[in-house]
Image (cartoon, rainbow, N blue to C red):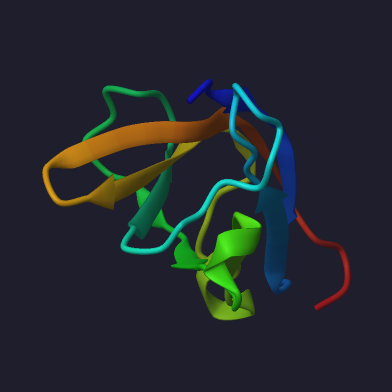
Amino acid sequence: MAVYVSNIVINSGTTFSETFTLESATTNASFDLSGYSGAAQMRKHAGASTGHDFTVDFPEPVTNGQIILTMTATTTSAIKAGRYVYDIVITSGSNKQTVVEGNVLVREGVTR
């Protein structure tokens, strides 16, 4: 599977949600996520020792290949404004693969 690049914007202090749809690189059909689990983090740079976790969900039916990343408003309010990198890794057994990666722009909110 190819790694998709998608840049995202998070407004600090607000609820964040982004949906990604994975497709098979050979057939362009939806990627079946049955039997997979997911994890995603953002960090200041790939080698940074600390990161911020996203919640990763696969909505039903998992055969549609959708991945939803979320963060609560409480979580986003604790993130300093700036540029970060992130990726989404899916795992099935011992098979681990990065499926989405990109940059994150965290913007400081005005309304409190």
Using residue 42 as the reference point, say whether residue 71 is left or right of it: right
Image coordinates for residue 34, horizontal then vertical, percent? 40, 63
Residue drawn where x is 35% and y is 24% of the image: 46
Image coordinates for residue 94, horizontal then vertical, percent? 11, 43
* Residue 67 is at least partly visible in this image: no
Residue 106 vs 14, above or below: the answer is above
Q: Within the image, what quadrant is residue 96 found in?
A: top left
Q: How many discs mark residues in the rendered view?
A: 0
Residue drawn where x is 60% and y is 24% of the image: 25
* Residue 112 is at least partly visible in this image: yes
Q: Nearer the viewer, residue 91 or 13?
A: 91
Residue drawn where x is 27% and y is 44% of the image: 50
Q: Nearer the viewer, residue 19 or 12?
A: 19
Q: Within the image, what quadrant is residue 74 found in?
A: bottom right
Residue 96 vs 37, above or below: the answer is above
Using residue 8 as the reference point, say whether residue 65 is left or right of it: left
Image quarter hosting the C terminus: bottom right
Q: Nearer the viewer, residue 43 or 7?
A: 7
Using residue 27 as the reference point, say whether residue 93 is left or right of it: left
Image coordinates for residue 89, horizontal then vertical, percent? 37, 42
Residue drawn where x is 59% and y is 33% of the image: 24
Image coordinates for residue 19, horizontal then vertical, percent? 71, 58
